[in-house]
Image (spheres, rainbow, N blue to C red):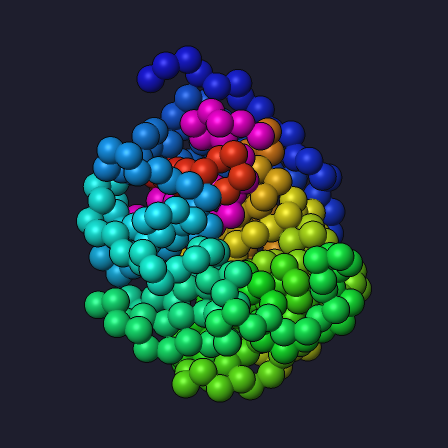
């Protein structure tokens, strides 16, 4: 298995509020994350000669446990079986700036293409069904190449970040790099409402980066404020969970457990009341089992975790659930 990694956990920020102190320990192959244990599947994902992972903006798993990787390369959409064998690849000439991804229980695919300012919907067979936003037409938020600051909230979109779908088919989009809003659409793509403004207060955002609705509560990753905020479906603020390190992606599994990919080089597992169940990472590293820019996260039917990385990470790692 090679030399063991140093076992340690050193959060970049002290946990506060609702989060309890639970550490994650990493050795060469086994990760103890609270009461949960995972085994790193080292070298998961077999790429053809000459292909590369690139900046892996997102990862998601479909109903067949196939792993979909959305990445900023010449092969932007790759699908693997759970053993890591490439099943198919598509998206050339379609995607420009792979960022967010959501797959529904019927395997409908929603993709956020950041710089083009759009969200695209595809059937499981790859047929295009819906586009949200106007390609190449960012909204006005006061952000310019000179100011590089969101001055006020704007309509959809100015560099959107992520998308998620409710069981009723409603669509939530986080609009964050050059906006500060969460947008809610009906199943046909009609805008219902938007909320958020720039800042650090309740209901304000500094780079809103992911959104997930579950049973009438809307969870929003407020990345540069290092927190998750919780709202009602009509945008009313309920509570704030501090203590994260640039949360990028939120995913809630069938057991009502939330997984958080954090750009601060760690992964957190929490319940839906904000209590920390497990965490590992926080030391920037290319070593297997550690992280350099976690940006996407999802689980399969067996509880295994897939983490996609940007920055110098530029890879996907699989952690198989063993306990």
For the N terminus, the quadrant is: top left
Locate residue 256, reporting x and y percent: 46, 60
Residue 273 shown left or right of residue 35 in the figure: right
User: Number of numbered discs present?
Assistant: 0
Residue shown at 53% from the left, 27% from the top: 285
Tell me: residue 319, above or below residue 134: above
Locate residue 92, reporting x and y percent: 31, 56
Tell me: residue 307, above or below residue 232: above
Depth order, front residue of 110/282 = 110
Tell whether position 295 is magenta. Answer: yes
Tell me: residue 95, above or below residue 269: below
Residue 319 shown left or right of residue 135 in the figure: left
For residue 83, say whether it is visible. Answer: no
Tell me: residue 314, above or below residue 64: above
Give the quarter of the image for residue 138: bottom right
For residue 48, say whether it is visible. Answer: yes
Residue shown at 37% from the left, 14% from the top: 2
Residue shown at 59% from the left, 29% from the top: 283
For the C terminus, the quadrant is: top left
Locate residue 178, reporting x and y percent: 66, 63
Residue 174 shown left or right of residue 35 in the figure: right
Q: Which residues are magenta?
A: 284-309
Give the quarter of the image for residue 131: bottom left
Depth order, front residue of 126/278 = 126
Residue 230 shown left or right of residue 303 in the figure: right
Give the quarter of the image for residue 142: bottom right
Residue shown at 50% from the left, 42% from the top: 310
Depth order, front residue of 51/298 = 51
Locate residue 95, reporting x and y percent: 39, 60
């Amino acid at each position: 298995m090679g030399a063991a990694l140093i076992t340690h956990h050193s959060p970049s920020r002290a946990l506060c509020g609702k989060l309890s102190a639970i550490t994650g320990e990493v050795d060469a192959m086994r990760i103890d994350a609270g009461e949960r244990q995972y085994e790193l599947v080292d070298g998961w994902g077999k790429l053809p000669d000459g292909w590369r992972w690139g900046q892996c903006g997102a990862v998601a798993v479909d109903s067949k446990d196939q792993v979909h990787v959305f990445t900023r390369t010449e092969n932007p959409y790759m699908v693997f079986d759970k053993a890591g064998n490439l099943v198919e690849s598509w998206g050339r000439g379609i995607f420009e700036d792979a960022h967010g991804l959501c797959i529904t229980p019927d395997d409908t695919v929603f993709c956020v293409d950041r710089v083009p300012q759009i969200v695209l919907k595809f059937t499981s067979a790859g047929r295009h069904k819906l586009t949200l936003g106007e390609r190449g037409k960012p909204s006005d938020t006061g952000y310019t190449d000179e100011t590089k600051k969101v001055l006020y909230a704007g309509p959809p979109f100015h560099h959107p970040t992520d998308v998620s779908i409710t069981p009723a088919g409603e669509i939530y989009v986080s609009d964050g790099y050059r906006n500060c809003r969460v947008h809610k659409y009906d199943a046909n793509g009609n805008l219902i409402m938007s909320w958020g403004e720039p800042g650090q207060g309740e209901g304000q955002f500094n780079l809103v980066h992911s959104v997930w609705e579950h049973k009438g509560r809307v969870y929003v990753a407020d990345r540069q404020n290092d927190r998750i905020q919780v709202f009602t479906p009509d945008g009313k603020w309920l509570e704030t969970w501090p203590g994260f390190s640039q949360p990028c992606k939120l995913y809630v599994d069938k057991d009502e457990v939330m997984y958080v990919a954090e750009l601060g080089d760690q992964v957190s597992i929490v319940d839906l009341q904000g209590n920390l169940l497990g965490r590992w990472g926080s030391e920037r590293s290319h070593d297997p089992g550690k992280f350099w820019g976690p940006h996407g996260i999802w689980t399969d039917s067996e509880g295994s975790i897939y983490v996609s990385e940007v920055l110098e990470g530029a890879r996907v790692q699989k952690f198989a659930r063993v306990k």
